[in-house]
Image (cartoon, coloured by chain):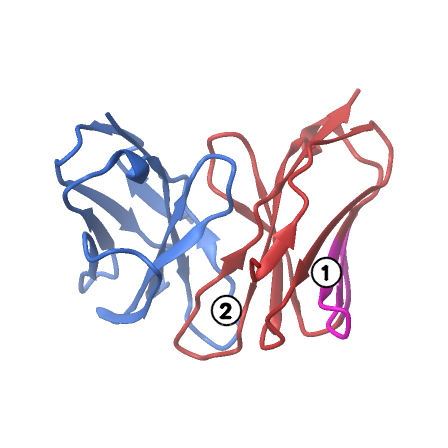
Amino acid sequence: QKEVEQDPGPLSVPEGAIVSLNCTYSNSAFQYFMWYRQYSRKGPELLMYTYSSGNKEDGRFTAQVDKSSKYISLFIRDSQPSDSATYLCAMREPNFGNEKLTFGTGTRLTIIP
Amino acid sequence: DAGVTQSPTHLIKTRGQQVTLRCSPISGHKSVSWYQQVLGQGPQFIFQYYEKEERGRGNFPDRFSARQFPNYSSELNVNALLLGDSALYLCASSLMHQGAEQYFGPGTRLTVT
């Protein structure tokens, strides 16, 4: 079993819809949770960064972490065609000096105009 | 400010050859990490360096090595290339404080024939 599980999709939704992306994990030591957006053949771009459980909102994006269920989510409101990309969840333990990120496989998202 | 830069952008090598990939971190960032991303998968952690010392190593063979220079730039070396080494190699940098965010470069796409 992988430490981080993510549905690879692909996921297609109409423009303006709310998108929900999810990851589950098995390592209870993970404390930092990230969502990266990756356009085709580009490097990952940091979208959201949260520590421990709770919600964080930034514009049209909301990240949720439920440590009791080992489940994290990213919501995109009013989705735009420019949101079409692969979304990677990533997480790490709170070990100072060791910054290893463990990623999911990524979910490929297409927003249909 | 410039982001993380990597060179070269693309590289084609033959099985058995050796390759060196280069990374320059964001100005002020002293920690550099390397990841391998195979098509359709999330990035896999290879190495982390901080102040020229190795701080973390992923599950990769000894054919993979890296180093960090006094200016915090880094090189990743891969010897005796195999077809399976074909991937996008990503470099990430951070400020290396507790919970520091990691920012990725555009990557080097390596093709082994």
At horizontal 53% and vertical 78% (from top left) the residue drawn is A94
Mark 1 or 2, which is nearer the eye?
Answer: 1
- The residue tagged 2 is B100
Q: Is residue A92 above or below residue B75?
A: below
Q: What residue type is labelled 1?
A: Ile
- The chain carrying label 1 is A
Membership of A69 in magenta stretch: yes
Q: How far apart are marks 1 and 2 (CA)?
A: 19 Å
Tell me the chain of label 2: B
| Image spot of residue A14 (x, y percent) | 84, 26
Q: Which residue is drawn at 38% across and 55% down?
A: B26
Image coords of residue B80 (percent x, y): 14, 42
Under mark 2, the amino acid is Ala
Q: Which of B24 and B13 is in front in this view?
A: B13
Q: Nearer the viewer, residue A16 or A103?
A: A103
- Is disc 1 surrounded by few (<14), some (14 to 19) or many (20+) residues within 10 Å? many
Give the secondary structure at mark 1.
strand
Residue at the spot x=52%, y=63% of the render? B101
On screen, residue B13 versus residue A12, left or right, reads: left
**In blue, which chain?**
B
Q: Residue B50 carries which label?
A: none
Question: Which residue is disc 1 drawn over?
Answer: A72
Marks 1/2 in contact by CB < 8 Å: the verdict is no
Q: Which image quarter holds the N terminus of chain A? A: bottom right
Asked if residue A64 lies in the magenta stretch, the reply is: yes
Q: What element carries label 2?
A: loop
Magenta span of residues: A54-73
| Residue extending furthest toward the front | A1
The answer to whether A111 appears left or right of A49 in the picture is right
Is A74 placed left or right of B78 in the picture? Answer: right
